[in-house]
Amino acid sequence: MTVAVLAHGVGGRTDLPLTASVAVAGAVWAVIASFLILSVLWPRPRTGRDNAGVPLPATLQRIVSSRPLWEVLRLLVLLAAVLVTVAAFAGPTAPTDNLAPFALYITFWVGLALVSLLFGPVWRVLNPLRFLHRGLAALQGRSPDSGRRELPAALGWWPAAAWLAVFVWLELVPPFRSEPAVVGGFLLVYAAVNLLAAHTCGATWFDRGDGFEAYSTLIGALSPVGHRADGRLVLRNPLDGATAVRHEPGLTALVVVLIGSTAFDGLTRSRFWVEQIPADSIPAGTLGLLGMTLAVAALYFLATAVADRRTSAAPVTTAEPAQEAASARRPVAAVAATGLSAGQGGSVPATARVPLRASFATSLVPIAAGYVIAHYFSLFLFEGQTTWILVSDPFGTGADYLGSRDRQVDYTFVSTTAIGYVQIGAIVAGHIVAALIAHDRAVTIFGERDARQSQYPLMAAMLLFTGTAVALLVST
């Protein structure tokens, strides 16, 4: 059996269907056109309605709500997680022959984003750490929601942002990232720390403290499948879910980490980085990742600060923490939108002002989703096949449980041209959806004039994001 060498990102590409100048110009003009069209054709809020969506058949609703079904799925996911962790220590020592690196970095990390984008925040109901925590709480005769102390509301998404920062650093920087023992060690530490935190603060810890669950929750907000306020499963406009996510401390940091890390991944594939920076330099990689993340944060903060000064109105406060926590317990949920109605556009007292970076943070979510798809789509399609090859013989004993041990990775079932269009299309689509969310949020909380004024700095920032992301993609 031959297995391709594990690597992060999309790998080198010199056969994209468009030249660099055409790709960048086309992407930038697509975002500009979306802003111009929105300013004319979208004068009033159109998303965030409690009753939005088309109800799905009652039979499907019953299936999706089946507790036995989800219990079986949770058990299977837990067994899979245990298998991957054990294989990391007891399987082959060569990274190219071990199941764990491929399962974590490719199948899980990229697959979780794709599944969440299609079906909502599935990791909230499949998370094996929640399953284990519930079992441990039952053994102790207490409710899993109870803890020794309450999780401070001021923490918000910050623990999840920190976990994702650690994970993307491990995935992108150190040369030993694909060593099976390193992967296994990370999984054990991640599980132990989060279980201890859940024991201390209760199951609500996973809502904002588990990096992977928070990642799935944010990406899942863009899913066309969701629950209305009355609990009914519906097909909805993805914007309804995204605009309903309220800002909490750390939310901006969480999304910035996702955008900055994928932008850094593109930078490491550029000719400049490959020719000038040693591939195994941890300090250079760490500084590069930190620099790209800070650059994304600085650009967003600058754009929202300028927009804030250009408007006389001010965003209203976000939802109450209790309201957020209640809706977070839904498997596929969206928080009811709050804010001024279309007829209430105008200013509010200065004492109620909230920084625009808080109100528009969710507009970064589709950009992050687009970057993840663009940078890891081909990796998932091709290198992801290796997971299913290796799982047939997870411990390198010569077994062939699934009959796939001797299969080869098929690099021909999707053309490079198709992959190139998907990559560029994901970046452009992410920025256009971001423009839609930002504009709808603006017309919700501002008068018509101020809504337009607030969009110019954000448009400039998104154009820079778009151009840079596409340029890095086509320059590999």
Image (cartoon, rainbow, N blue to C red):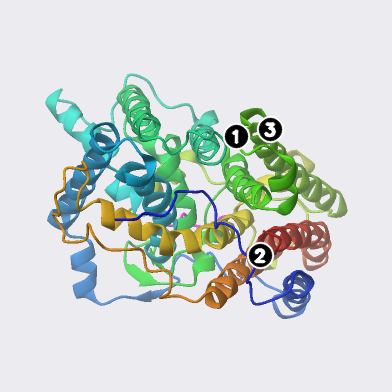
Q: Nearer the viewer, residue 324 or 369?
A: 369
Total of numbered circles in the picture?
A: 3
Q: Position of residue 427 (x, y in %)?
A: 63, 65
Q: Position of residue 278 (x, y in %)?
A: 67, 37
Q: Which residues are magenta?
A: 333-338
Q: Is residue 367 shown above or below 156?
A: below
Q: Is residue 407 left or right of residue 298?
A: left
Place residue 355 in its image quadrant: top right
Q: Quadrant of the C terminus?
A: bottom right
Residue pointed to by mark 2: 431
> Element under label 3?
helix
Q: Secondary structure at mark 1?
A: loop
Q: CA distance from mark 1 to mark 3?
A: 9 Å
Q: Nearer the viewer, mark 3 or mark 2?
A: 3
| Circle on res. 280 | 1
SS at mark 2 in the image? helix
| 454 to the left or right of 203 | right
Measuring 54% from the left and 29% from the top, which residue is drawn there?
A: 154
Give the residue displayed 75% in from the left and 71% down from the top: 35
Instruction: Name the residue type under label 1.
Output: Asp
Q: Which residue is mark 3?
A: 284
